Image: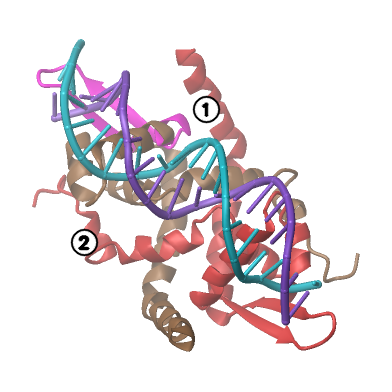
Chain colours: A red, B brown, C purple, D cyan
Amino acid sequence: MSQSHIDVTALTGEACPVSGVLDHVSGKWSIGILVAAAQGPVRFTELERSIRGISRRMLTLQLRKLERDGLLTRTVYPTAPPKVEYALTDMARELHESLLTLTGWATRHRSAIAAAQAEYDGRLG
Amino acid sequence: MSQSHIDVTALTGEACPVSGVLDHVSGKWSIGILVAAAQGPVRFTELERSIRGISRRMLTLQLRKLERDGLLTRTVYPTAPPKVEYALTDMARELHESLLTLTGWATRHRSAIAAAQAEYDGRLG
DNA sequence: CTGGATCCGCAGAGATACTG
DNA sequence: CAGTATCTCTGCGGATCCAG
């Protein structure tokens, strides 16, 4: 009631639907995949090479999730050897703009965050 | 080489530092906490009530992490009973703007995403 | 009121091998 | 090339109890 009473549910809807949606984006690899795919249609192996450290299994799972959310399109070319291309949907391209804002912030404050962490850790041991 | 060769490391720096920073923000509760704390100084119990579903343990852990990252300030009033207030730092307030863009996107496309998921699931079983 | 400490279950994520 | 299948292990996160 008072201005100090905050209810996140009022900001996000009833049962945190925003968080529900954002959780898909906030996965460990989601942003990287979306950023990589934003350059244009990308093949599976290209993604695997682009995103250092991701396992084939994880890439597949994340790709499926993003496709399910309507953020990626998956196009299969019935050639030999098989060729599959992933591309951002219009919705995802819109999201990509927001993501750039986020990554921009992260880049700008990277050193400040590192400093804050170092200082915090220093105060303890 | 060709234009189809994408390297995320080239976009994010060397070893995905952006992702490293964003991972802190992309936790299950981080965004909710930051949004809730953005309204002004907030007490521990207020946060606990605001963010439905979070456990006391998780709230504490996330709070510590955000404080360590220099995104939250923690102010202890040595009263009885103890009173602790959390507030966003300038850096975090900047981030909050970006977060609003993100949540705005999520809100706008919530139904579209739900539809995409339903359609995806429908095609399978 | 604001936490810390501990135990524990389960899903996430890696490694590896196999397939159309 | 583009996955799938399985096995395993780690660590997140909940529950509970304790403390300043």
Quadrant for residue A58, please give it. bottom right
Q: Front-most of C17 and A93?
A: C17
Chain of the residue under label 2:
A
Asked if both marks, 2 and 1, belong to the same chain, the answer given is yes
Q: Residue furthest right?
A: B1
Q: Residue at horizontal 50%, vertical 76%?
A: A68
Amino acid marked by disc 1: Gln
Residue, x 48% and y 84% (percent of image)? B124
Q: Position of residue B119 (x, y in %)?
A: 44, 86
Name the chain letter of the residue that bears numbered label 1: A
Q: Is residue B82 magenta?
A: yes
Look at the numbered disc 1 and give the secondary structure of its residue: helix
Residue A47 locus on image (x, y percent)? 73, 64
The residue where tag 2 is placed is A10
Q: Marks 2 and 1, how far apart in space?
A: 32 Å
**Above or below for D4 versus A16:** below
Figure quadrant of residue A81: bottom right
- Whether A19 is among the magenta residues is no
Q: In what element is the residue under mark 2?
A: helix
Left or right for A87, reference B111: right
In the rendered structure, which segment of residues is drawn in magenta?
B66-87
Figure quadrant of residue B111: bottom left
**Looking at the figure, which quarter contains the C terminus of chain B?**
bottom left
In the image: residue A111, left or right of residue A124: right
**Residue corresponding to mark 1:** A117
Total numbered labels: 2
Query: Type of residue at label 2?
Result: Ala
> In x, y percent, where is residue A123?
46, 14
Along the polypeptide, which appears first: circle 2 or circle 1?
2
- Residue A85's spot in the image, x, y percent? 72, 78
